[in-house]
Image (spheres, rainbow, N blue to C red):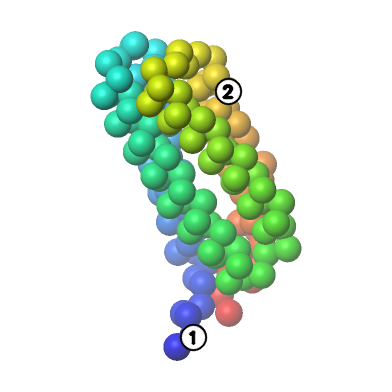
Amino acid sequence: MPKAPVQSKAYIEECQDHHQEFYALANAFREAVKAGEMPPVTQSAIDALADYTHLHFSREEEIMEKTRYSGLTDHRDRHRALNHRVKEFQKAVKTGSVIELSAVNTFIKDLTSHDREEDSPFFEHLAKHGAR
């Protein structure tokens, strides 16, 4: 059975909601690191962020594939790099390694940059080619 067409406006709204959740989880992780929370609290925060990172990037790439976005390969590579950093934080928490607050802040800054600079061309593409 063919998949339903992508509705660009609905997806853009969904993605914006995802981004709000993404930042809430990233900020919760930052606050846990900043406060020096006990490992279970920090572990819970990074696990939630890792799960959501995978969910969001998978969904975004699915829509890129459906709409034949020409920047998919580069965008997917960027997602992999960001996801790798989340997994590194996750590994550090599990092993009890020190996580520098500056590294978390840089990661959040890079997420923001990704959303503003790299997702914008995709949203433009989606507005033109989303509903098929």
User: Can you identify the residue that label 2 sits on?
Assistant: 106
The one nearer the camera, 52 or 113, is 52
User: Can you identify the residue that label 1 sits on?
Assistant: 2
Q: Position of residue 28 (x, y in %)?
A: 35, 27
The one nearer the camera, 52 or 128, is 52
Question: Cβ–Cβ below 8 Å for labels 2 and 1?
Answer: no
- Amino acid carrying label 1: it is Pro
Q: Position of residue 32 (x, y in %)?
A: 34, 19
Is 76 situated above or below 38? below
Residue closest to the far front: 95
Please state, as top left, top right, bottom left or bottom right, where the C terminus lies in the image: bottom right
Crowd tier of the residue under label 1, counting other residues whose Cα lies within 10 Å: few below 14, some 14–19, many 20 or above? few
Is 59 situated above or below 84? below
* SS of the residue under disc 2: helix
The one nearer the camera, 93 or 46, is 93
Please name the residue shown 60% across and 45% down the image: 80
Crowd tier of the residue under label 2, counting other residues whose Cα lies within 10 Å: few below 14, some 14–19, many 20 or above? few
Is 54 situated above or below 68? above
The answer to whether any part of residue 88 appears in the image is yes
The residues bearing labels 2 and 1 have C-alpha atoms spaced at a distance of 41 Å
Please name the residue shown 51% across and 51% down the image: 57
| Residue 47 as seen in the image, left or right of residue 16 | left
- Amino acid carrying label 2: it is Thr
The answer to whether any part of residue 112 appears in the image is no
Of labels 2 and 1, earlier in sequence is: 1
Please name the residue shown 58% across and 42% down the image: 115
Please name the residue shown 55% across and 33% down the image: 85
Is 49 situated above or below 105? below
Q: Position of residue 1 (x, y in %)?
A: 45, 88
